[in-house]
Amino acid sequence: VRTGESRVIATDGSIGWVAWSVCNAIDVPGIHGLIVNSTDVTARKEAEAELKASQRQLMEAQRLGKIAYITSDILADRVYWSDNLFDQRKVPRRPFFTLQETMRFLHPDDRQQHEAIRAAAIAERRDFENEVRIVRGDGSIVWEHSVGRPRYDEKGNFLGVLMLLQDITERKTAELALAERERELSAILDNAPVAIFLKDRNLRHLRINRLA
């Protein structure tokens, strides 16, 4: 028996799809030939094409937005990454990680805080958010904003977490640089030997040094 799927041109000129099978019945009495069966699968093929197109668009949107996701399975001790997260974290692709392996990507100084936020959300059965530093496969450090949702079975047993991750390194770097400039400006003003104050056009004070 041979099977396959082929495009066909209908009498009205439209193009469709058929799934077919051919069975050799040459030695079957009364037939002595081939038995061919075909089924119109145009609707299925069009749905599959639309699904693939949607998946490509979703992956492109995730890439442009630097968005990825992970899902964890506590019972199996496995964490699964979306394809683009491997690129985002500069890690070779593999089927899954253990929970301990995944935690190692968190910056050591952020790990305890993240685990505490995650544990509280699991206990309270609610979503959680956090911003952490990630140590990538090449040793570079980036910032990620994570939104997590704990998952439970019908009996209420904890199964794992679905997490949406976004690389926010550019924004976080800008915020930290701005904060550093603010600290430097405050230090200059406070150490100036004269009184200094800044007002807006409505004469409201914006900044005052310690001698003002």
Image (tube, grey):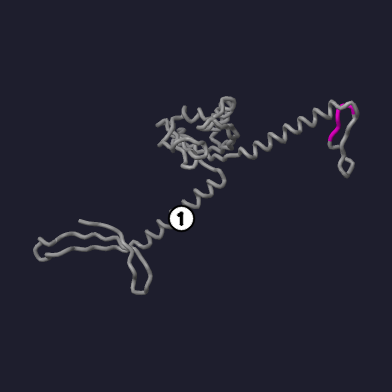
User: Which residue: 40% across, 56% down?
Assistant: 48
Pick whichever, 58 or 139, lies toward us.
139
User: Which residue: 16% across, 60% down?
Assistant: 24
Q: Is residue 186 left or right of residue 65?
A: right
Pick whichever, 129 or 90, lies toward us.
90
| Label 1: how many Cα within 10 Å (few below 14, some 14–19, many 20+) | few
Residue under label 1, please give it.
Answer: 53
Q: Is residue 171 magenta?
A: no
Location of residue 176 (image quadrant):
top right
* The C terminus: image quadrant: top right
Could you tell me residue 90's position as x and y percent? 50, 36
Q: Which residues are magenta?
A: 207-211
Could you tell me residue 59's position as x and y percent? 49, 48
Residue 27 vertical placement versus 109 (above, below): below
* The N terminus: image quadrant: bottom left
Q: Is residue 30 left or right of residue 1?
A: left
Task: Give amino acid for label 1.
Answer: Ala
User: Which residue: 36% across, 65% down?
Assistant: 16
Location of residue 22 (image quadrant):
bottom left
Residue 178 vertical placement versus 11 (above, below): above
Pick out the residue farthest to the bottom: 12
Magenta region's main secondary structure? loop
Could you tell me residue 177's position as x and y percent? 70, 34
Q: Is residue 196 left or right of residue 160?
A: right
